[in-house]
């Protein structure tokens, strides 16, 4: 439950050790993790990262699972190269941290 002391009740949970089946690509000004289905069904899914970022092994594992079910899957870095939230971060600074993450801005 969110409250002033804990404004975003997010937890990284169990971080898995996972290398991934896909690879990193560049899509205009954003890097992304791309994984393709063994059988191309002509369909794709965009996986939206959470505050822990696009490189989290858990997120890549989910993208690979989706690809295993027939979909080309891409996980864009919507933080555009900026660091994701760290689980030990001070939650009182979270709103300010969030303001600095804007996928529309190109990395300088």
Image (tube, rainbow, N blue to C red):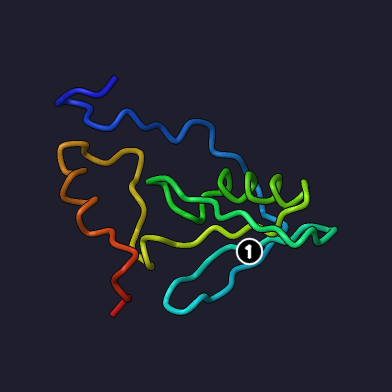
Quadrant of the frame with the C terminus: bottom left
Is 61 displayed left or right of 36 in the figure?
Answer: left
Residue at numbered disc 1: 34
| On screen, residue 40 above or below 15 | below
Is 23 displayed left or right of 104 in the figure?
Answer: right
Q: Nearer the viewer, residue 87 or 48?
A: 48
Q: Nearer the viewer, residue 7 or 92?
A: 7
**Residue visible at 85% across and 58% down?**
39
Tag count: 1
**Spot occupied by residue 34 in the image (x, y as percentages of width and height):** 63, 64
Give the quadrant of residue 82: bottom left
**Spot occupied by residue 3 in the image (x, y as percentages of width and height):** 19, 23
**Residue visible at 65% across and 58% down?**
44
Is 25 displayed left or right of 76 in the figure?
Answer: right
**Spot occupied by residue 107 in the image (x, y as percentages of width and height):** 32, 76
Quadrant of the frame with the N terminus: top left
| On screen, residue 102 above or below 25 | above
**Residue visible at 71% across and 45% down?**
65
């Amino acid at each position: 439950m969110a409250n002033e002391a804990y404004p975003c009740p997010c937890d990284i949970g169990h971080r898995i050790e996972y290398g991934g089946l896909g690879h990193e690509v560049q899509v205009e000004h954003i890097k992304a993790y791309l994984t393709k289905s063994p059988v191309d069904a002509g369909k794709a899914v965009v996986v939206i990262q959470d505050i822990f970022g696009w490189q989290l092994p858990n997120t890549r594992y989910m993208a690979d699972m989706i690809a295993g079910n027939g979909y080309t899957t891409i996980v864009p870095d919507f933080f555009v190269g900026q660091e994701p939230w760290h689980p030990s971060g001070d939650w009182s600074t979270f709103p300010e941290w969030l303001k600095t993450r804007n996928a529309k801005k190109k990395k300088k």
